[in-house]
Amino acid sequence: KDSPVAGRQDEHKYGIDTTRPSIARAYDVVLNGKDNFEVDRAFVAEIVKVVPEIYDVATYNRRILGRGVRFLSGQGITQFIDLGSGLPTVENTHQVAQRANPESRVVYVDNDPMVLAHGRALLAENDRTAVVTSDLRDPAAILADPEVTRLIDFDRPVGVLLVGILHHLHDDEDPRGIVEAYMAAVPPGSHLFITHFCASSQDSRDAEQKFLALLGTGRFRTEKEITAFFDGFELLEPGVVPLPLWRPDEPVSAELTVGQRLMYGGMARKR
Ligand code: SAM
């Protein structure tokens, strides 16, 4: 029997398709959430065969998201555009940001309609947060979206989050140009935060290829390629590093596991 392939949800023009796995729902599975279907769980079971550490990787990614948002709040950032935000789960961007500053505003953008359906329930009481169902590959449309212009003041610094998403884009979709378009719209003092699957130089190439074949979209990029997304901006310490090494809350053991090295992250400031 063929393995399920997630593919792009935009093929369904924002309808919820329960017959094919979705990236948002599969990510929910690996975060031990409950907003997923059998088809997503079967899909993750296939991924586990290729990348056994995938549940841990999702946890590292979620943790760095929290640390990054807290760091940005500490820098005085109170506005966030969270691109490819995923389904609501624990410690969502607005919860972390509003704990630091209750006035914080967050726009979540995701092209999976489940994100809107579940986000609405979570955010109903919160007029400083919105969910936009849209494709992040169209920055002009997103930057002009009424919810974005309602909540984000483009004269004040913005945190642009591209966490766990750019590896879903192929080079011919111009991920660098997309990053530039968002960063061009925000003023100096704004920050860019990226996490990304990192291509290894050694043994896991085969697993990477199989994993990507299952995802049906995007690619792993090298540390150098991930770092290049920050070109033109001031890359903050500690640079582009394996997720657990980015401004950790607790000391991290020197020897990282395969799962700990699978994704890299970094943050930069617009001068
Ligand atoms: N940013 C969250 C995090 O790191 O915890 C979630 C990451 S999840 C792995 C990737 C999300 O990006 C999914 O929810 C998926 O639906 C969304 N996504 C994929 N392609 C997208 C696109 N072209 N436009 C908007 N969202 C997209």
Image (cartoon, rainbow, N blue to C red):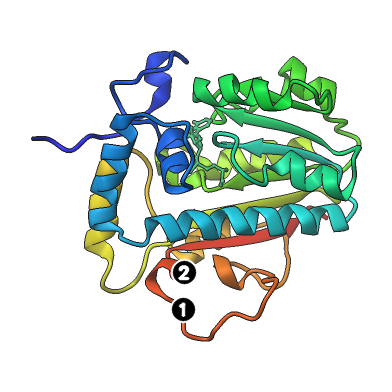
Q: Residue at x 12, y 35 (%)?
A: 2
Is residue 95 in sight in this rendering?
Answer: yes
Residue at the disc numbered 1: 256
Quadrant where the N terminus sits is top left
Residue 212, image x, y percentages = 30, 47
User: On the rendered structure, is 120 left or right of 9?
Assistant: right
| Identity, as a three-letter code, of the amino acid under mark 1 | Leu
Q: Amino acid at mark 2?
A: Gln
Q: Is residue 12 above or below residue 157?
A: above
Residue 238 location (% of width, % of height): 67, 73
* Quadrant where the C terminus is found in the figure: bottom right
Q: Residue at x 42, y 48 (%)?
A: 30
The image quarter containing residue 52 is bottom left
Local crowd size for mark 1, using a 10 Å CA cut-off: few (<14), some (14–19), many (≥20): few
Q: Is residue 254 above or below residue 38?
A: below
Q: Residue beneath label 2, please?
A: 260
Q: Position of residue 46 (x, y in %)?
A: 23, 46
Q: Residue at x 67, y 71 (%)?
A: 248
Q: What is the C-alpha distance between the residues marked 1 and 2?
A: 6 Å
Mark 2: secondary structure: helix
